[in-house]
Image: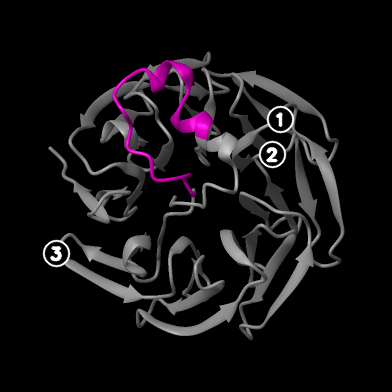
Amino acid sequence: MLRRSLQVSAEMFLLLFCAASLCASAEPRVTGLINRDAAVYSRSTGKIYLVDSAHGSVIAVSSPEHILPIKVGGEPMAIAINQKTDRIYVVNAADRSVSIIDSRTDTVVATVPTAARPYAIAVDEVSNKVFVSNTFSNMLTVVDGASNSTSNLRTGSADAILVDPERQKVYLLGYETDSITELDPNTGATRKLAAGDMHLWGMVRSEGLLYVSHVQGSSIAAIDPLTSKIQNLPTGSMPCAIAVNSKTGEIYVANYADGTVTILSKERKPSSVRVSAQPQGLALDEDAGLLYVASPQQNTVTVIDTRTAQTLRTFHDLDHPYAVAFSPATHQAYAINEGESPFTRLKPR
């Protein structure tokens, strides 16, 4: 998740970086808001692809010893992959474009325009379409993966995008609202789903439900898109990032103000795990049973054993890590940084 213009939401900036109890402490390193789409993993090549916004590149990581920067457009902000076509899509905020990379050759094969300054991105592998939100615009850019042609839909702005390929719906989250926009990409029709509170941040899908965090409160909403019913689930204070375990159904929530992660499970009572202060990024390695929690202001990544709900270790002295990427094949993890170094290998013990 990378930087976004502070003009977009000054309120969100102050909320995440200057909570009253935190501003009195040592001055944090402030660079901007955090974009959740920082890295992808290619199943066919076994490579991790990381956004390097400062250098206008995407970094392909085959192993700690084999690293290839791929030049894209100006200020790349987010990345997504279609595992069926081996195409990677990179949002270039400064250029108002999307770069398309062939992961088999690690080359840019096309660059297509967006309606305005792009920000969030998501891929529908079933329809082979890519959805890109645009800051300061109510237009959603749709890229046809077969032809690389683009079109635009008037949906309203979005800070996060989630695709439900089974129902052929796209969900758009905006921080400054109390609802989720549901889009039918086949017809362009939209409708609003109440989300239970204002100021939404994280969004995941599990077993037919949408889970959305209320970043100014202490809960996440479980929304049934079919019935529009909402159930609020308690968390710590200022829940932001959310991750879901597709095998167990467990939900993990990073609580910014508490310095905790809430674990919501059908099999056991909700629990809370202490991590470094101001956690903002989550990455779940399901097969290894590891949850990585990034705290950029503390220069740390905390590792939680999801099977025992216990902290295993904390990596210190990193370079403002805001996200974590890992290889499901080797389980090697990398912290993605806001600092001078684009990423840091998290070496196992």
Disc number placed over residue 243 in the picture, else none: none
Residue type pointed to by label 2: Glu
| Marked residue nearer the N-terminal end (3 or 1) | 3
Is disc 1 placed on a helix, strand or loop? loop
| Marked residue nearer the N-terminal end (2 or 3) | 3
Report the residue marked by disc 2. 176
x, y percent for residue 144? 66, 77
Q: Residue at x 73, y 38 (%)?
A: 177
Report the residue marked by disc 3. 65
Report the residue marked by disc 1. 198
Q: How far apart are the two marked residues, 2 and 3, measured between alpha carbons?
A: 43 Å
Q: Nearer the viewer, mark 3 or mark 1?
A: 1
| Quadrant of the snapshot with the C terminus | top left
* Dominant secondary structure, magenta: loop
Judge left or right: residue 268 versus residue 320.
right
Q: How far apart are the two marked residues, 3 and 1, measured between alpha carbons?
A: 45 Å
Is disc 3 placed on a helix, strand or loop? loop
Q: Magenta segment range?
A: 14-35
x, y percent for residue 93? 51, 65
Residue type pointed to by label 3: Glu
Badge 2 crowding class, 10 Å Cα cut-off, few under 14, some 14 to 19, many 20 or more, is some
Q: Are marks 2 and 1 in contact (CB under 8 Å)?
A: yes
x, y percent for residue 344? 22, 50
Residue 32 seen in the current view? yes
Is disc 2 placed on a helix, strand or loop? loop
Q: Quadrant of residue 227?
A: top right
Residue type pointed to by label 1: Met
Judge left or right: residue 5 versus residue 340.
right
Q: How far apart are the two marked residues, 2 and 1, measured between alpha carbons?
A: 7 Å
